[in-house]
Amino acid sequence: MSSETPIQMKKTSSFLPYPNDHLPDYALKKAERELKETPEAKQTALAEFKKMLQGKWDPREIPLDDFIKLYMLTSLQILRDPMVQINGFKTIFDMKDTNIHHLRHATLHNLYILYHLPLNCIPVRIKGLHVVNQTALVSLAWKILYPFLPEKIKKRTHFHSDPRKLLDYFPSSTLPVQYGGDLPEIDSTELTWRLNKEQRDNSMRGQPNFY
């Protein structure tokens, strides 16, 4: 094990710093070689993830327990990317059309679960939480949760009255058109099928990195 201090390690040219906001050349080449990744395929995949994460949840069709399972499945699959493990998550919550059917699930118990899971049960670095199309229900839930949130999360949570303000935090190439970005609307049906297949093929006991 190295005897270097963290400060000495930072000065080492071969040390990869954790505040990394891009893919190193070796990762790009490996993705092209083994995953057949192209700029077009990358944009399509990003669009599919954005579409799925912003998809509308109807609790009358999908029970809360199944919704949480889908959230966990998606998060764990995304975390198989080593660059995500380093860079962390920036998540957009589009709260448009939240209604009385969602309100009946906004119990203290459920709010605690939705707070506890991402902060304490998933090994992820939360770099930013962005809320758009805020409703009265969201404001109520936020007031209930706020006193219990770590100071770091409070500072990294942003509410946007205009979705286009997301462009101050995200490149337009990673946002769909309704947020002022360049990505089109894409059906996420195929992506959901692929995520389920990956979950079956790679159990929770040891999911390998994508590359």
Image (cartoon, rainbow, N blue to C red):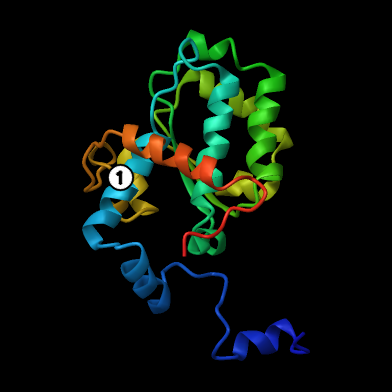
Residue 13 at x, y percent in the picture: 54, 91
Of helix, strand and loop, which one carries label 1? helix
Quadrant where the N terminus lies?
bottom right
Query: Disc 1 marks which residue?
Result: 47
Task: Pick whichever, 130 or 62, lies toward us.
Answer: 62
Residue 191 at x, y percent in the picture: 36, 39
Q: Which residue is at the far front?
A: 201
In the rendered structure, the answer to whether residue 185 lies left or right of residue 123 reads: left
Task: Pick whichever, 164 or 93, lies toward us.
Answer: 93
Q: Residue at x 60, y 29 (%)?
A: 142
Specify whether residue 35 is in view. Answer: yes
Give the image quarter of residue 73: top right
Give the image quarter of residue 194: top left
Task: Pick whichever, 166 or 107, lies toward us.
Answer: 107
Q: Residue at x 36, y 67 (%)?
A: 34
Q: Residues within 10 Å of mark 1 (few under 14, many from 20)?
A: many
Q: Residue at x 33, y 32 (%)?
A: 189
Residue 182 at x, y percent in the picture: 21, 48
Q: Is residue 202 above or below residue 68?
A: below
Q: Residue at x 61, y 52 (%)?
A: 124
